[in-house]
């Protein structure tokens, strides 16, 4: 009965994913045809320091020209989570209609506004706009440092003339870019009122690029030949490392196991009073259930859910859903798929908890629901408070928070409970090939390098070494302005990560059992998940050595959200490591005869 319920849940989930697919992909074909002189709205999105991608502000937080008739664009959940706040810009770009040095407004900048612009130019502020769903960027000003050693001598200039170059194909917009006129600037160096006039120019040019390929320009930036070479070098390096080390470990492990099986077979034919040694000696303790089994089952359930989430995100990525500047698609997918996969967490955690002879399955279910969401929610509360203090667009509006709470209340929690009930009713027994004795054996004294932390360091280093080259490109995309679209390569790296994690955890579990240490349950989970700690260590290196991020808000966002992501990796890879070790331990004890 439990399995049939779970199958029904799984079917509903898969159906929901494919139904949801349509909401992630924009229907470009019907909404982007224009006639001559049609008014196509240009939306201003945000401004912010170039090196601090999380620290963005509304476009009109800076004293640009405003008509007072600006309209906010209605945005999807993912766009709001991404910090997008689109508002109609004061520039009029009519379809196929050129304009030359058209005035936006004449404005007298007060001392306070001059200081505000100067501070923005000093921090390398950029702006982002959207025209017909195509992104536009540019810097708002420039700093003249030439021949000046002392920063107090620097001159600060604000660009006041922007030129839009637009390519079109028949009735479609294909490409747009913005150029700032370096000769048309406002001097912001001194604190004094300045009279200025903001101008813009529009140039239209025909192209033969088809509408369907207009996004390829952005996709190709991450698949340029020199980038692809590095990605393939990364994969080949990972594969060679993996093949050599896993082959080496497999050879040793198989040879050792073969010798063990032969030795134990001979022991059985020899005198019965001969003392057992090695992993066979602890056969009566190896399947003794771990301490804190409710927490263990909850961690396994949460890790399995995050693994399912990752697989479904990869599926959507590989079919082309997350094309560049499909605003907020990834965030929408993460929220919705996480909600829909909560049934997997409930089923896995509760069914395993029941197998471990746990009695309070309701408490276990609550723990499962809070194990990942709890720390994530607390971190979100802190970082959202920081964003509100900075008046940044990363601060979520009350309505968006309410939507997320409703999703959690009406989708995540009910599915978690349904999964838990299905897991409880499955009533599967734990499959142990040998009997567990009444009293545990004493674990012999072991050298320091066989303790948990050194073993975790050994277990995490090898999987991390297989992915660290690819990590740089992911970080440069998530915490920078690079575009990452080579999901096929990323998927290969992910598969390598899983294989190495499983193999290294199995090897360390064998060596632990051979040393007559039967407390392998938590150890295998911690060793499998230790790669997450290495990734967080890489965050420290990336922040200080590879990025120019600065300021309290950006630093707290980077380390705060990366802590949550690495914690998710810890749970997911820990589940993979434990499952691999459980399969291995069952196999070797099934292969020998024990009293």
Image: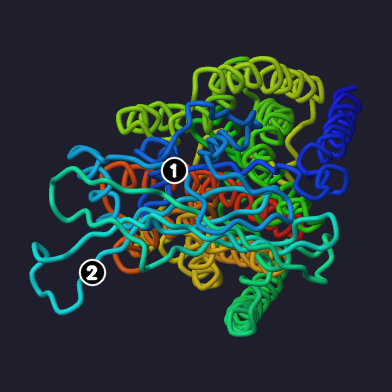
Q: Callout 1: 10 Å neighbours few (<14), some, many (20+)?
A: some
Q: Nearer the viewer, mark 1 or mark 2?
A: 2
Q: Residue 409: image x %, image y %? A: 64, 15
Residue corresponding to mark 1? 561
Q: Callout 2: 10 Å neighbours few (<14), some, many (20+)?
A: few
Up the image or down, 242 lies above or below 126; here it is below
Q: Is residue 523 left or right of residue 346?
A: left
Q: Is residue 188 left or right of residue 448?
A: left
Say which of 67 and 134 sits in front. 67
Is any atom of residue 550 visible in this view?
yes
Q: Residue 287: image x %, image y %? A: 62, 43
Q: Residue 236: image x %, image y %? A: 64, 83
Kindly identify the residue that appears in the image at 51 percent across and 70 percent down: 462
Q: Is residue 19 left or right of residue 53?
A: right
Q: CA distance from mark 1 to mark 2?
A: 36 Å
Up the image or down, 238 lies above or below 204; here it is below
Kindly identify the residue that appears in the image at 82 percent across and 25 percent down: 426
Kindly identify the residue that appears in the image at 17 percent across and 40 percent down: 111
Say which of 461 and 554 sits in front. 554
Q: Give the mark nearer the N terminus: 1 vs 2.
A: 2
Residue corresponding to mark 2? 144
Q: Residue 81: image x %, image y %? A: 55, 35
Q: Identify the secondary structure beneath mark 1.
A: helix
Say which of 486 and 281 sits in front. 486
Classify residue 177 by image quadrant: bottom right
Say which of 358 and 135 sits in front. 135
Q: Is residue 483 left or right of residue 194?
A: right
| Label 1 with label 2: CB-CB less than 8 Å | no
Q: Identify the secondary structure beneath mark 2.
A: strand
């Amino acid at each position: 009965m439990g399995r049939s319920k779970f199958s029904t849940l799984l079917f509903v989930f898969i159906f929901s994913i494919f139904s949801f697919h349509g909401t992630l992909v924009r229907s470009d074909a019907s909404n982007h045809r224009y006639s001559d002189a049609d008014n196509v709205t240009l939306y201003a999105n945000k401004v912010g320091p170039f090196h601090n991608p999380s620290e963005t502000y509304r476009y009109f937080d800076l004293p640009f020209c405003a008509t007072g008739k600006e309209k906010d664009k209605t945005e999807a959940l993912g766009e709001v989570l991404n910090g997008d706040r689109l508002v109609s810009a004061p520039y009029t770009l009519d379809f196929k209609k050129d304009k030359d040095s058209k005035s936006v407004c004449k404005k007298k900048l007060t001392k306070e506004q001059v200081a505000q612009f100067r501070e923005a130019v000093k921090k390398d502020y950029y702006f982002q706009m959207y025209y017909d769903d195509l992104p536009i960027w540019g810097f708002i000003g420039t700093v003249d440092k030439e021949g000046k050693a002392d920063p107090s001598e620097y001159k600060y200039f604000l660009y006041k003339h922007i030129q839009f170059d637009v390519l079109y194909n028949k009735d479609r917009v294909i490409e747009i870019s913005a150029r700032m006129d370096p000769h048309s600037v406002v001097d912001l160096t001194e604190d004094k009122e300045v009279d200025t006039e903001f101008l813009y120019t529009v140039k239209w040019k025909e192209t033969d690029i088809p509408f369907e390929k207009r996004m390829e320009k952005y996709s190709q930036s991450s698949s340029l030949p020199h980038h692809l070479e590095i990605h393939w070098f990364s994969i080949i390096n990972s594969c060679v490392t993996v093949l050599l080390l896993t082959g080496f470990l497999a050879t040793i492990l198989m040879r050792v196991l073969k010798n063990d099986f032969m030795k134990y077979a001979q022991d059985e034919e020899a005198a019965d009073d001969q003392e057992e040694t090695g992993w066979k000696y602890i056969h009566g303790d190896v399947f003794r259930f771990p301490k804190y089994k409710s927490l263990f089952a909850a961690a396994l359930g949460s890790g399995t859910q995050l693994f399912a989430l990752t697989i479904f995100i990869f599926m959507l990525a590989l079919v082309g859903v997350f094309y560049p500047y499909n605003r907020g698609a990834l965030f929408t997918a993460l929220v919705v798929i996480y909600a829909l996969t909560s049934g997997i967490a409930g089923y896995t955690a509760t069914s395993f908890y029941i197998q471990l002879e746990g009695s309070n399955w309701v408490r276990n279910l609550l723990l499962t629901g809070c194990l990942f969401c709890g720390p994530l929610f607390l971190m979100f509360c802190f970082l959202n408070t920081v964003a509100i203090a900075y008046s940044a667009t990363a601060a979520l509006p009350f309505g968006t928070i309410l939507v997320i709470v409703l999703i959690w209340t009406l989708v995540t929690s009910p599915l978690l409970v349904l999964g838990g009930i299905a897991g409880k009713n499955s009533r599967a027994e734990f499959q142990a090939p040998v009997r567990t004795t009444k009293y545990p054996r004493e674990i012999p004294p072991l050298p320091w390098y066989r303790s948990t932390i050194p073993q975790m360091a050994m277990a995490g280093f090898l999987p991390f070494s297989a992915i660290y080259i690819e990590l740089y490109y992911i970080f440069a995309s998530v915490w920078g302005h690079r575009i990452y679209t080579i999901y096929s390569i990323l998927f290969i790296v992910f598969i390598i990560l899983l294989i190495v994690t499983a193999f290294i955890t199995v090897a360390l579990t064998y060596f632990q059992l051979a040393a007559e240490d039967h407390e392998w349950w938590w150890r295998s989970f911690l060793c499998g998940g230790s790669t997450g700690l290495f990734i967080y260590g890489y965050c420290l290196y990336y922040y200080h050595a590879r990025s120019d991020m600065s300021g309290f808000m950006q630093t707290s966002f980077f380390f705060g959200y990366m802590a949550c992501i690495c914690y998710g990796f810890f749970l997911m890879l820990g589940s993979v490591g434990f499952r691999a070790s459980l399969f291995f331990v069952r196999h070797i004890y099934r292969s020998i005869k024990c009293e």
